[in-house]
Image: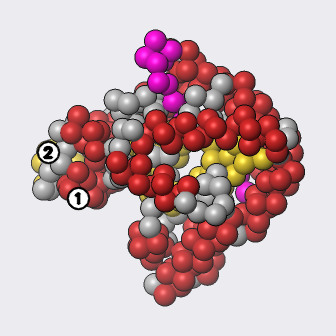
Amino acid sequence: MKVGVFLFHESRNPAADDQVIDEAIREAKLAEDQGMDAVFLAEHHFDGNCVYVDPPTFAAALAMATTRIKIGFGVLQTSLYHPLRMAEQISLIDNLSKGRLIVGLGRGSLVNTHEYSGYEIDPDSAQERFEEIEKILLQCWNNEKVTHAGKYWNFEIPMLRPRPFTKPHPPILRSVASEASLATQARQGRPVIMAAATAKGAARNIAVYRKAAEEAGIAAHKIEDAISQCWVARTVVLAPTDQEAHEVGLPYFHQMQTYRAAQSTAFEARAAKMNAQPSLPVLCGSPESMVGDFTDLEKTGIGGVIVRFRTGPMPAEFSTRALKLFMQHIAPQIRNTELATAAD
């Protein structure tokens, strides 16, 4: 199983934005130095929840700051973009990174309506825009002259430049937030990015995927190949001891929940539901406490895990130490030997 880091750095104080952006770059470099396979980027606007805000711009910076590690979007809020600008940006970053992009796409935030209003996008149109934009991306990357007539965009261009470095184009993975959307992608044999708080949750998702793909008549080897390209996102609070993780680290996670809940009633409801469960809403503890969950995750056959180490106002020192602990004590138990060797 491949391992990646999810850079989702919060900045509540605008005066600290430059510092936190620098810390995110350093964490990406550390991930590469520690042998991780990928770094994934989030996207949120106008609220400090994701300090670098614009993942394509930040991905271009990371393409220049790193040499080997894959750079993934987890995910682009597709409905907020003009499709031609998105196609150009992704193609350019694919060239700058020499084919290291993983293009994760989602329709847009499910909880932050201020992002839609800021970009003057009707959230009820987000899914339709998403579908049309993905179609345009593929047209632009696969064809030369492109003529498009749709509900939201109409244009004709002689050719998109630059052409993608990856042929025919970088891999596209959709984000899924429900079993219905997961099954829809499975019936097409498409790999996805999913979220699961535990290995049991991921196993349920993989079972849904396999069942839907089998019912669609997809061959077994193609199903396993698609699953091997899927990623699951996790959040961890990791420290050398269980006590430090719970007493020092976990409050940062809850502060993140409180901060975001104050900005979004939808997120407030989601957080309340998570916190009402008998178990913690996040993996929390020492490497010894959580390694079993990750080894169980590896057994599902999923291709990779995206680990978010930093939440809320957590200091960089806490999250970078967690990343190192993960790579020293957990990653060797779950990584494919050939992949690990290639990354060294």
Mark 2 and mark 1: Cα distance apart in space: 18 Å
Give the residue displayed 67% in from the left and 24% down from the top.
Answer: 316
Residue 19 part of the magenta segment? no
- Give x and y (percent) for residue 153: 15, 48
Does residue 320 sit above or below 126 in this rendering?
A: above
Quarter of the figure with residue 342:
top right
- Give, as a three-letter code, the residue at label 1: Glu
Does residue 67 sit above or below 130 in this rendering?
A: above
Decide which of 311, 259 is in the foreground and name it: 259
- Give, as a three-letter code, the residue at label 2: Phe
Give the residue displayed 48% in from the left and 39% down from the top.
Answer: 258
- Residue 128 is labelled as 1
- Give x and y (percent) for residue 300: 70, 70
Density class for disc 2 (Cα within 10 Å; few <14, some 14-19, many ≥20) is few
Would you name the residue on which mark 2 appears? 155
Q: Nearer the viewer, mark 2 or mark 1?
A: 1
Q: Which residues are magenta?
A: 1-17
- Give x and y (percent) for residue 278: 64, 63
- 118 horizontally vs 299: left or right: left
Give the residue displayed 29% in from the left and 39% down from the top.
Answer: 115
Assign a secondary structure to mark 1.
helix
- Give x and y (percent) for residue 35: 77, 38
